[in-house]
Structures are given as C-alpha cells and as structure tokens.
Amino acid sequence: MVLTDIKLKLFSLQNLQIQITKNIPEYITKLYAVRDSNGAFKLENCINYDTRNWEKYQYGFINYVVHPDCTFNKKEAIKANDFCKIISKRFKLKILPFKYYLLPNNDALGKLYNFEYWMSYVGGQAYPDIGEIFTTYSNENYPH
C-alpha cells in the first residue's frame, strides 16, 4: 500500500464519521392529535395530557405538579412558599401563582417538552411569562 492510498483511506474514514455525526438527530418530537369541540383533529401540546393523572398540590401560590416517580415533601413545599414570601417582601414584589413541575430526571423533562428523545441536559428551567417552573432534581424547594 502506498502513502496516497493510506491518506485516502484515512480521509474516507474521517468523512464517514462526519456524515454519521451529521445524521444523528438531536431530538425527536411527539405531538398528539385530539378532537376539538367540532370533531376536527388538531395538534396539541403533550404536557396537559401527560400530566393529567399526576398528583397536584397547592401551597400558597405554588401549584405543584408531581411526576409519579417523585415523592412529594410537604415540609419542603412550605419552606419554598416561605422563601418566596420573604423575597417578595424584601424586594416589594407581587407574587403571582405559578406551576412547579417536579420531575425525577432530564428524560422526564424532555417528555413534557414534547420530545420522545433529546440529546440535552437541563436541570431546571423557569418561564415567568407563563408562570411555570420545571426541575429535574425532584425537589420542592430550590432557593436560589
């Protein structure tokens, strides 16, 4: 085998690796088709459907939505509510009710975000405009 043949084979292997990497999807989404009141099918976000049977708890203005693999801790929920009250008083903020999704891991979060599969890691996210917080740490109280 001559040097040009070796270089060509190495280039081909590198090119193959690049092609394989390019074609791996970062995520696969899922959507649900549901009938509306007129009987027409429409696409719907999965979160309402997927959480319909989850336990729900309200502590003050925090509405917890708890994944079946998580154990809800009432004492930590009370601490979270108290922490928010202290911060709102200190900075003179009005507290609006919000949903707090308690999840056991990143895969469960991906499922709520309509991903059947995703190559991402997120510990938690807050969406103040729609009043929702998501955590993958299985904790009711995350003061930071």
Image (spheres, rainbow, N blue to C red):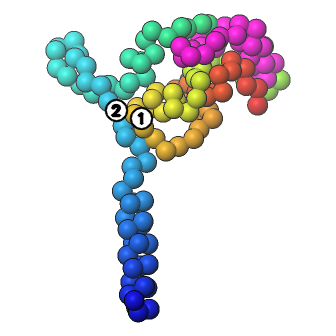
Residue 115 numbered mark, or none: 1
Q: Judge by depth and name the residue closer to the eye, 142 or 13.
A: 13
10 Å crowding of disc 2: few (<14), some (14-19), many (20+): some
Residue 72 falls in which quadrant of the image? top right
Q: Is residue 72 above or below residue 132?
A: above
Q: Is residue 4 above or below residue 101?
A: below
Q: Is residue 96 above or below residue 143?
A: above
Q: Is residue 79 magenta?
A: yes
Residue 65 visible in the displayed image: no
Q: What's the residue type where badge 1 is placed?
A: Phe
Residue 71 falls in which quadrant of the image? top right
Viewport quadrant of the N terminus: bottom left
Viewport quadrant of the C terminus: top right
Q: Secondary structure at mark 1?
A: strand
Q: Position of residue 10 (x, y in %)?
A: 44, 78
Q: Earlier in the sequence, mark 1 or mark 2?
A: 2
**Residue reaching furthest front?**
1
Spatial separation of the CA atoms under disc 1 and disc 2:
6 Å
Residue at 71% x, 7% y is: 74
Q: Judge by depth and name the residue closer to the eye, 43 or 96.
A: 43
Residue 130 numbered mark, or none: none
Q: Position of residue 47 (x, y in %)?
A: 43, 22
Q: Position of residue 13 (x, y in %)?
A: 41, 72
Q: Secondary structure at mark 2?
A: loop
Residue 87 visible in the displayed image: yes
Q: Which residues are magenta?
A: 59-88
Quickly name the residue at label 2: 30
The answer to whether mark 1 and mark 2 are in CB contact below 8 A is: yes
Q: Position of residue 48 (x, y in %)?
A: 41, 18
Q: What's the residue type where badge 2 is placed?
A: Lys
10 Å crowding of disc 1: few (<14), some (14-19), many (20+): some
